[in-house]
Amino acid sequence: MAEIDDRMNVLEGYIAEQDKTIQELSDVLAEQWQVIEKLTKRLERSERVIEEIVSGQDDNVGPVGFVS
């Protein structure tokens, strides 16, 4: 019976380690998702600004900072 108890203890240890690893991975995934959401919003804002700049330029206007 001692052998079964030892094996159970080993298995319980493995399960505890896996639970901890799963929780850590879940936490990292949640953090990465927040970063992705922030970067997506920044990209969307940048795209809007670029579109406004491009659509607001006349054909006769040179590059930004160009003085004719």
Image (tube, helix red, strand yellow):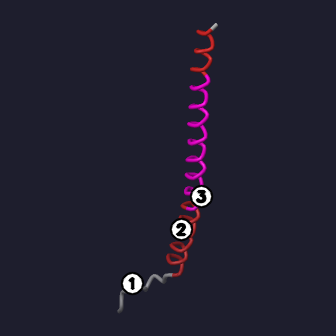
The chief SS type of the magenta part is helix
Q: Position of residue 17 (x, y in %)?
A: 56, 31
Instruction: Characterize the local packing of mark 3: few (<14), some (14-19) or many (20 or more) Cα atoms within 10 angstroms.
Output: few
- Tell which circle, 2 or 3, labels the residue nearer the N-terminal end: 3
Viewer-nearest of labels 2 and 1?
2
User: At x 54% / y 61%, what residue is drawn?
Assistant: 39
Disc 2/disc 1 C-alpha distance (Å)? 21 Å
Disc 2/disc 3 C-alpha distance (Å)? 15 Å
Instruction: Characterize the local packing of mark 2: few (<14), some (14-19) or many (20 or more) Cα atoms within 10 angstroms.
Output: few
**Residue 62's image quarter?**
bottom left
Would you place residue 12 above or below residue 23 in this image?
above
- Residue pointed to by mark 2: 47
Q: What element carries label 1?
A: loop
Q: Quick one: 44 or 24, which is closer to the camera? A: 24
Q: Which amino acid, mark 3?
A: Glu
Q: What element carries label 3?
A: helix
Q: Which amino acid, mark 1?
A: Gly
Which contiguous range is marked in magenta? 12-38
